[in-house]
Image (spheres, grey):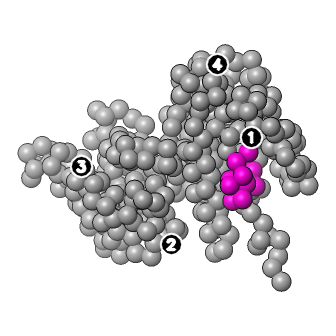
Amino acid sequence: MTSCTETRKPLIALTMGDVTGIGPEVVARAATDAQVLEWCDLVVIGDPVVLDRALQCTQQNTAVNVVHSLQTLRSQQQSNSVNCWNPSSENVAGVPVGSIDPRAGQAAYDWLIAATDAALNQEIDAIVTAPLNKAALNAAGLHYPGHTEILAERCGVNDFAMMLYLPVGDIVKSPHGFGVAHVTLHTSIASVPGLLSTNAIQEKIGLVDRFLKQLGCESPHVGVCALNPHGGEQGLFGNEESTLIQPAVEQAQAIGINAFGPLPADTLLQQAIGGKFDGVVAMYHDQGHIALKLIGFNRAVNVTLGLPIIRTSPSHGTAFDIAWTGQADASGMRAAIKVAAALANRQRLK
């Protein structure tokens, strides 16, 4: 006989993000999507008043079911409703739309921390985060570059990375999808060379290899980007390729990882999308993000690697310019939920 634990759908928490942006709208659309609800059970971690307003804004004929504890969530489930738990004391219902407001920054942080703790305590199976605003975080006195660094700190990990992942489809030729992880993340271009190290690059190669194996890719091929144009042209444009990146690739190969590089980023990413590589390690944020967002903006999913929990998110930001107009596209949020549900299901089968 199959137990309830084995057959139940994964429970995924959607954090509302910055309420002055499009987060509440994409959460409202995704949380009422029939296909999404086939993949998983959901709870929104956010403000129920804001969620109700977002449901009305997006013309979803669904009520908000306020829950007071994740432990009793399944017994409190109501039909034709969206579960919402609010562990923040911030009053954000009246925050102006499209503004940088410390109340919105604090609430987004509170919701993320509560979701992370719930995942660490195995009360939920995964987190999918709506976008927050870095300036609003800082206005609240929370000096983090973004979600990734908050999650890593809360989970107590030092070896982590952001991956931008494109699921299997007509764009990507690899049968397991395609992901790009970054050695440096939310930092200035000027600071990138000084932040690179052989150890950091090798760590990211290992994280990409392990993630792809989680997806069922038994022997991933991982391409590693050069930092400089044309791979440095034998030192004419810089020597980071020979002093930092090549040793990291060789160390990864020595422990059995199919790593290749350093290779010029422009041709490497084109080859990877064509199926030659299952994953890529980029040296900095835009080196990987631009290529993937260009070919699959609404399908690309952020996955935080190296955490003891599952966290994904859509690849877009708060989009203040269209917030609360009913125009927000939830396809990125749906894609992020689908990836989180797939990872959660695979993890439960281990």
- Above or below: residue 330 compared with residue 282: above
Q: Are marks 4 and 3 in contact (CB under 8 Å)?
A: no
Residue 293, image quadrant: top left
In the image, what residue type sits under mark 4? Val
Q: Which of the two labelled residues, at mark 4 and mark 3, occupies the earlier sequence position?
A: 4
Q: Residues within 10 Å of mark 2 (few under 14, many from 20)?
A: few
Query: Is 33 part of what is drawn in magenta?
Result: yes
Q: Position of residue 225 (x, y in %)?
A: 27, 53
Q: CA distance from mark 4 to mark 3?
A: 39 Å
- Magenta segment, which residues? 32-42
- Disc 4, SS: loop
Q: CA distance from mark 3 to mark 2?
A: 27 Å
Q: CA distance from mark 4 to mark 1?
A: 19 Å
Q: Position of residue 290 (x, y in %)?
A: 35, 41
Q: Are marks 3 and 2 in contact (CB under 8 Å)?
A: no
Residue 191, image quadrant: top left
In the image, what residue type sits under mark 2? Gly
In the image, what residue type sits under mark 3? Asp
Q: Which of the two labelled residues, at mark 1 and mark 2, occupies the earlier sequence position?
A: 1
Residue 96, image quadrant: top right
In the image, what residue type sits under mark 1? Ile
Q: Residues within 10 Å of mark 4 (few under 14, many from 20)?
A: some
Residue position marked by numbered label 3 in the rendering: 266
Residue position marked by numbered label 1 in the rendering: 45
Q: Which of the two labelled residues, at mark 4 and mark 2, occupies the earlier sequence position?
A: 4
Residue position marked by numbered label 4 in the rendering: 97
Residue position marked by numbered label 2 in the rendering: 216
- Above or below: residue 116 compared with residue 2: above
Query: Image point 55% across, 45% down: which residue?
Result: 332
